[in-house]
Structure formats: structure tokens, C-alpha cells
Amino acid sequence: MTTLRLPALYIDNAVTQEAVGTPALLNRDPCPDESGVPIESRVALEILDTGPDGIDRSATRVWVNDALAFEGGGAPELQLGYDGPEALITETADTLRVVLHPTVFFQSLQSVTVRVLSETVGGANTLDTHYSFEVEDRSAPKLLAAQATDAFTVRLSFDEPVTAPAGAVFQLAPQSAPAVTSQVASATSAASMLILTLDKEMSPDVGYLLTVSGVLDAFGNLILPPHDRVLFTGFRPARPSDRRFHLWTMLPHHNRRDDQTGDLWRFIASLQEVLDLMVAEVDRFPDIFDLERAPEPFLDLILQDLGNPFPFDLDALSKRRLAAVLVEMYRQKGTAVGIENAIRFFLDIDVEAITPFTGTTLVLGESELGVDWELGPSDSFARYAFDVIVDQVLTDTQRSQLRAIVEYLKPAHTHFVDLVEPIPQGGFDHWVIGESELGWNTLLH
């Protein structure tokens, strides 16, 4: 057998397989079912006879994708197309090693099948088997289509997942005039799509030629011409079907007839584009007023317009909910129900009760000085004072927010005195045999 001497050999995993016969096919490179094989790879294999006969070289054939690549005993043995300078045939007493060097590279993502036919000397044992491997991806990504989803956004579709590194360049060129030339401000990858955000609105219904460079697929292949460009139409905002607002048709007929050079038409077309965009903004006003669809900056303005008195930091969903119920909160201002609903809305805490505050007062003929009475509030204060009782222990932030809510919603002449929370239960001090002393470190419970 062939002796291979290496500086070191490390084996992480070894799998033993029982030989089912002879000859045996060994040391295949690329190995069966391997993927990502370089397109310039050689195909190497060894045929081994584990018995005393040896391999019959003249009876050995190797096919690559149904093309005969090696014919033992032929003249020549290495067939045209697989006889590159690194092709090699080596034979020992029990092993035949075949190295095929394709003179033409494999194709990107090609599935290559290798068939081996051989037998031992004398023909007692034969071998007829095949295996396959897959070539690496060397295909450049292709830009399939582009679509303007709104005035500032263009969605690109590719034939495979892609990324847009920092050096990627996107160029937009209008194909007619008048038109706005927009630049790409940012690009976001989404599987086999790229989402482009523009710095200026596109001109509606104008054709744009988009050219892409620097975009990569998952294997680092750059996009290449002619699959790096595509035509698409600028976004046209939705508008009522019966709207007719064309400046050109509003001009007197004699002015349109006198426009022999087309300069007046181009000037009016420029104004028409600006007008269309302004009207489209007006058409979007209902979306701004709608609490469910309004952008978040407009939610702050809506709350400001409603006179929002609560200085809490809210997310977008909470702002929409608050804008929807703020007027009702105003209506319930000054009532216990209003206070309870507001606390539940902001803090998700149920108020157990809102109770009148009553100080311990002096009763003539019964109270004893310093024993069962304390200095309480005046009659007018006690009459309009109250406590808020909750059924859970609050954090410092919740306490400050709850007090702010109550102070705003309570009637102006009333006084919020105490926020009553449950008292946390302490642990019991049990007896310990041999250590506890009665009346000293034990508690009856």
C-alpha cells in the first residue's frame, strides 16, 4: 500500500465500516455528498484490493457526468478534457490511484456524478459504483425587479439572498423630463430583497433606471452587468378616480396652441408635479387624524392639542389609548370613579377604596390627655380629606405617579392625605431547642 508520511496527524472522529466486498473505493476527493467544492478542483480516488489478486488496471473505467475520463490500458488512458498537468495515475501491488485534472472548470452549483467500474485481476471480484458532489456557488446575484412602495421607498428583488455593504452604490436616473433625481440615503437587507430609502420624493409615473454595484450574495459574489440594472416607475399616490386637477388643461387654448417649442408645457408639468404631491399630502390628513394610523410624532401633537396633563413617558400604543380616553377622563375629573379609572389606565393597579380621612378627636368627659386622643385636623380639613387604599405594595415610581394622578383628578377643595398599602408580613421567630429563652427571644403566634 501507499505510505504517506505527515509531520502530524490528528483524528477528531473515526467511523468504522465493515467492508462488503473487494475491490473497495477509498480516499475520494471531493468526498461523496460534499458541497461547496471549488470549481477548479481535481477529482481523486483510490481503488484497493484487500485480497491477494490486485486491481486490473485495464478493466478500470472512470466517468465524470457520463463523460469517460479514464480508461485503463487505453492510449491514452486519461481522456481529453481530464488530462490537465496535475492529472496522475499511480499503481502499486494492491492499489490504483487516479487523479483527474479537468481542463475546463466545473460550473457554479453543478452536481457532479463520478462513476467507477473496475475488477480484480482474473475478474473474480468487480466494482461498479458512483457518488456525487456539488460545486460551490460562483454565480453572481441577479436583480430581477424594482417597485416603488411609496414616494421615498424602493423595494428590490434578487434571485438569491443578498447584502449591501458600506461600499454598495445605487444610482437612479430618470428616463424622462421633468423629473426629480433622487439619491439613495440607506439600504436595508431583507433576505432576497433590498429596501432603499431615498432622500427626495420620486416624480410620480416617471420611469427610473436603477443601477446597482457592490451588492454581494451569501458567498461573496458581486453583482455584475447586465443583471445589475432595472427599470421601474415612480410612485403615484392614490387619488380619487373622478379628480381632474390638470394645470395644462386650465390654460387658455391660445396659450397652448402657441407653445411650439414645448417650453410652456414642461414648465407647467413641473408645477403639476409639485401640485400633485401637495394634494397627496392633503389626502393623507385623515391618516394623521386617525388615532390608530397616525405616525408617532403626530400622536404627541394630538395629546398636546387635547391638553394632556400627565407628564409620563408612554410608548406609541399607550399614547393612542390615552388620546382615545382623555376626553372621558376630563368628564370624570373630580369623582372617585375617575381617579380609579385613571390609576388603572396608567399603572394597571386596582384601587381598593377611596375613604374619608378622620382624625382621632377629643371627647369631653371621656378622653384622657395623652392617652386616647391626638391633635387632629380642623373640622373643614377633615370634612374634605380622603385616603386612597390599594391592594398591593407599590414601588417609589408608582407612588409618585399615583400621587400625581390623584392630585390632578381630585376636586380642587379636597385634600389627598394618605396612600395606604398592605403591610408586608414579617417572618415568625420560632423556638429553637437549646437556644430560645421564654419571654426573651420567642414570640407567641
Image: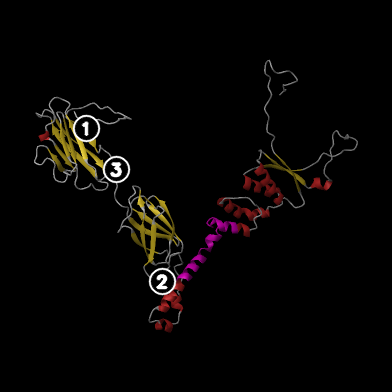
* Residue in the foreground of this view, choosing between 278 and 328: 278
Going from N to C along the chain, the mark reached first, 1 or 3, is 1
Quarter the N terminus occupies: top left
Q: Residue at x 69, y 24 (%)?
A: 429
Residue 111 screen position, x and y as percent = 24, 44
Q: Is residue 227 visible?
A: yes
Going from N to C along the chain, the mark reached first, 2 or 3, is 3
Going from N to C along the chain, the mark reached first, 2 or 1, is 1
Q: Residue at x 83, y 41 (%)?
A: 376
Q: Secondary structure at mark 2?
A: loop
Q: Secondary structure at mark 3?
A: loop
Residue 326 screen position, x and y as percent = 63, 54
Q: Is residue 245 visible?
A: no
Q: From the viewer's perspective, is residue 92 above or below residue 433?
A: below
Which mark, residue 36? Answer: 3
Residue extending farthest right: 365
Name the side, left or right, on which 211 lies relative to 68.
right
Q: Secondary structure at mark 1?
A: strand
Answer few, some or many: residues within 10 Å of disc 3's Cα (few below 14, many 20 plus, some between 14 and 19).
Answer: some
Which mark, residue 178? Answer: 2
The answer for how far apart the CA atoms under marks 1 and 3 are is 21 Å
Answer few, some or many: residues within 10 Å of disc 1's Cα (few below 14, many 20 plus, some between 14 and 19).
Answer: some
Residue extending farthest front: 7
What is the span of residues highlighted in magenta in the rendered image?
A: 273-301
Answer few, some or many: residues within 10 Å of disc 2's Cα (few below 14, many 20 plus, some between 14 and 19).
Answer: some
**Mark 2 or 1, closer to the camera:** 1
Name the side, left or right, on which 94 lies relative to 390.
left
Residue 261 screen position, x and y as percent = 38, 80
Residue 244 is a magenta residue: no
* Residue in the foreground of this view, choosing between 279 and 76: 76
Disc 1 marks which residue? 26
* Residue in the foreground of this view, choosing between 69 and 258: 69
